[in-house]
Amino acid sequence: VKTIDGTCAGPDDLIARVVHGEVDVPWFLHVDNPRHRASFFDMDALEGGSLRVLPVKFVAMVPCSLVNDTNSTKLKAVVDFGHGLLYSREELLHCHFLHRIANDNGYLLVATNWRGMSELDLPVVLRTFIAQPNLFKAGRDNLIQGYADKAALQHFYRNGLLGMDFLTFEGKKQIVLESNEPKFIFYGISQGGILGSAYSSLMGPSQLIDRSILGSPGTPFALLMSRSDIFPFYRALLSLNLSHLRHVRIFITLIQMAYDSVESAGVLAPPLTEPFPRTLIQAGLGDSTVTTYGTEIMARAFNASIFPDNPRKVFGLAIEPGANSTWRGPLSALTEVVYVQENASIPISNNGAKHNHVHWCVRLDAALQRQLVSFVNGGNIIDPCLEDGCIRPNATCW
């Protein structure tokens, strides 16, 4: 374990301590090396039950408000952050908007890598696209191992994290709980929401996650990929390995058959009988990176509702009011913010849009942040569109 302490001296110095640690997790892959990313399931070990354990790294961040000597904020929630496409747990270190929310409300932040789709998996992703298409099965298997990593870590967060010595400050434990146990929340953005939707759904029966927040997510992979503004790069890579663009489409569709098992549309497909956590989905109409067509497919998989003031009706989703004094809001909900200028440029055909900033602005939107805080703090899903219909002229968030 390595700890790095902040000073909490200025208005922008919001983190009292960063902890880098490791937890042993069950290992399902045939190579006993966490750095080996082209590995497949060890079926003999799975069927025989002779699993091994290997270490997985995590990061935890303690906001200054939780350890203030004079008037500390009580701990309300432990928030597990899911990082974006081919990033790592280090993304949490740079999510300053989330540091501010955590400091204002009393959240302990944690994160680990999405094994199978982190920066360490980039070489395997490139090999799959330009030389060895069959490696997509290794990507799928590593994603499932990644879910196992996060499940084991989530068990640690819930049952051991708060008692660890590295959360002791100046000789005594200063983190005070608001209730007997804080809430345990998953919050994933972009790829974090795409993979997190399946992960949090799979975790439903365990009751290790109380609530799930998915920012700018979508499903399925085959739809998201070809409509994304980053697709031209991947299409160029595939064209080095395939003869025709029609082959690219066939290849993506074939991959989807494997990825159904690690996406929410597959995990939540009928006949579903297992519970999943209450889920809040937030998206921006006009997003050029993750199409909101995919977001709405995901919302239907969760049987989510929209609010009366949502910018548009969504096929297959019921309309329910937001939380009030007698009602905590829908079991699961989709909130969309429309960015008028960018939304007008999204093509109807199955092509990617010109890059814009909607994907980034959704997480920074003040109304959506208030909705997120209300959901984390009290389990209430409010309607953030009551005042302005969630209409933004354009995506200018900085």
Image (cartoon, rainbow, N blue to C red):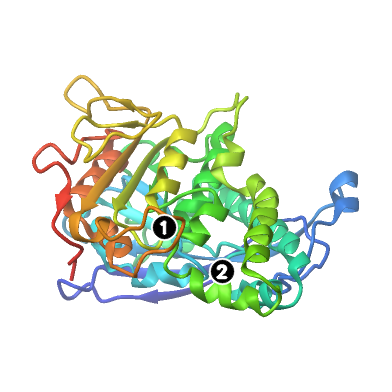
Q: Determine which of the numbered discs, if any, sits on residue 290 in the image.
A: 1
- Percent of width and height locating residue 274: 59, 27
Q: Nearer the viewer, residue 3 or 318?
A: 318
Q: Determine which of the numbered discs, if any, sits on residue 378 in the image.
A: none
Amino acid type, mark 2: Ser
Examine the rendered structure and indicate whether residue 353 appears above or below residue 339.
below
Q: CA distance from mark 2 to mark 1?
A: 18 Å
Residue that appears at 68% across and 56% down: 255
Examine the rendered structure and indicate whether residue 1 appears above or below residue 378.
below
Mark 2: few/some/many CA within 10 Å (<14, 14-19, 20+): many
- Percent of width and height locating residue 396: 17, 67
Q: Quadrant of residue 300?
A: top left
Examine the rendered structure and indicate whether residue 70 appears above or below residue 11.
above
Mark 2 or 1 closer to N-term? 2
* Badge nearest the viewer, 2 or 1: 1
Count of number-bearing discs: 2
Residue 341 seen from this side? yes
Please state if 123 lies on the left or on the right of 353 as rendered.
right
- Percent of width and height locating residue 36: 73, 73
Residue that appears at 60% across and 39% down: 267
Q: Nearer the viewer, residue 266 or 155?
A: 266
Residue that appears at 57% across and 72% down: 235
* Residue with the mark numbered 2: 118
Residue 178 seen from this side? no
